[in-house]
Image: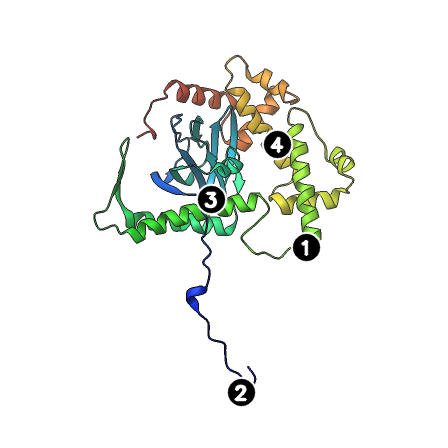
């Protein structure tokens, strides 16, 4: 401000307000649970008329939903739509997971549902906050009944819990739509690499019932072996063959749940050289044999109850 100048007096009564709209509104919560699932733990299959998400803090979780089985790794999230059948299980490992179920009418949640999503650091932080705050609002949880609020719970705590849950979902939706809320340095080279890796993953998924070589992928995407290997490893933390084998094993799980197929037929469907080699690879990636998986899956399906978690 120059010498002798005075600031203009503002009539704040004439200032216009700007109402903020809400795209995502959560008013009811059913569950907010932190679970450690031990080796070979499983949930009973279920469906319900509200949303449910599962976030994997540590370990590896398998999800059986909508006719497919998916592998959910550490730092990944899956959202189940209302009325979608889903079942969670672990094999030769343990996993720590966060589960939240709630009522929400936001149609944009469909954009981030039914698939495993690697969520960004902002969403991870929000989810951690949810499970720190939950103890301020609820005093206990009973199987088949739900949560009981603390008598001393305040409206501020409840709103804070709701805001964190809504913010986590909004951050994931924005990130999946390319409108990330986390400001991270990037350049054209990184963007091109990300596009390449995504295209290769799509290619591998399309060829999961076949046999794919590194040479074929290099020819398909016009890149040399070194560039291909380095970029894919940076983008997925796995080598291409390791990633492809993971896809094949997940696909084999789906086929093994079909009681009309035997292990040899599953191996043939996925173009393995022999059922013995398939069994070896299956055990390497899951910790159990195909026959053990079939037996376990059959027993769990036959034992489905309305109770959520096995006691």
Q: Residue at x 41, y 20 (%)?
A: 301
Residue under pointer 4: 245
Which picture quadrant has residue 145?
top left
Q: Quadrant of the N terminus?
A: bottom right
Q: Quadrant of the C terminus?
A: top left
Instruction: Work out how far the residue at label 4 is from the one at label 2, CA to CA, in angstroms.
Output: 76 Å
Instruction: Work out how far the residue at label 1 is from the one at label 2, CA to CA, in angstroms.
Output: 48 Å
* Residue 304 visible in rendering: yes
Nearest to N terminus: mark 3 or mark 2: 2
Within 10 Å of disc 3 (Cα), the crowding (few <14, some 14-19, many 20+) is few
Within 10 Å of disc 2 (Cα), the crowding (few <14, some 14-19, many 20+) is few
Query: Disc 4 vs disc 2: Cβ atoms closer than 8 Å?
Result: no
Q: Which mark is residue 4?
A: 2
Residue under pointer 3: 23
Instruction: Work out how far the residue at label 4 is from the one at label 3, CA to CA, in angstroms.
Output: 40 Å
| Lateral position of residue 60 relative to residue 157, left or right | right
């Amino acid at each position: 401000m120059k010498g002798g100048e005075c600031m203009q007096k503002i009539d704040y009564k004439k200032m216009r307000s700007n109402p903020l709209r809400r795209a995502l509104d959560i008013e009811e919560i059913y569950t907010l649970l932190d679970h450690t699932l031990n080796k070979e733990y499983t949930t009973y299959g279920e469906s319900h008329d509200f949303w449910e998400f599962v976030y994997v803090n540590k370990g590896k979780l398998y999800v059986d939903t909508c006719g497919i089985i998916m592998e959910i790794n550490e730092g990944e999230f899956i959202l189940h739509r209302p009325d979608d059948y889903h079942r969670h299980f672990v094999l030769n490992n343990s996993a720590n997971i966060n589960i939240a179920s709630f009522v929400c009418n936001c149609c944009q949640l469909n954009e981030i549902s039914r698939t495993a999503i690697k969520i960004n650091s902002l969403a991870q932080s929000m989810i951690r906050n949810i499970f720190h705050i939950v103890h301020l609002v609820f005093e206990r949880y009973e199987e088949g009944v739900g949560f009981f609020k603390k008598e001393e719970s305040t409206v501020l705590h409840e709103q804070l819990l709701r805001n964190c849950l809504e913010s986590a979902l909004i951050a994931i939706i924005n990130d999946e739509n390319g409108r990330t809320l986390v400001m991270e340095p990037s350049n054209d080279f990184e963007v091109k690499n990300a596009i390449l890796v995504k295209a290769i993953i799509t290619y591998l998924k399309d060829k999961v019932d076949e046999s794919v070589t590194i040479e074929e992928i290099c020819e398909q995407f016009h890149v040399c072996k070194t560039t291909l290997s380095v970029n894919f490893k940076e983008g997925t933390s796995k080598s291409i063959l390791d990633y492809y084998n993971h896809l094949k094993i997940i696909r084999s799980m789906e086929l093994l749940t079909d009681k009309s197929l035997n292990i040899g037929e599953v191996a043939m469907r996925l173009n393995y050289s022999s059922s013995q080699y398939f069994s070896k690879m299956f055990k390497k990636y899951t910790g159990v044999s195909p026959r053990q998986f079939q037996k376990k899956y059959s027993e769990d399906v036959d034992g489905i109850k309305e109770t959520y978690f096995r006691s």
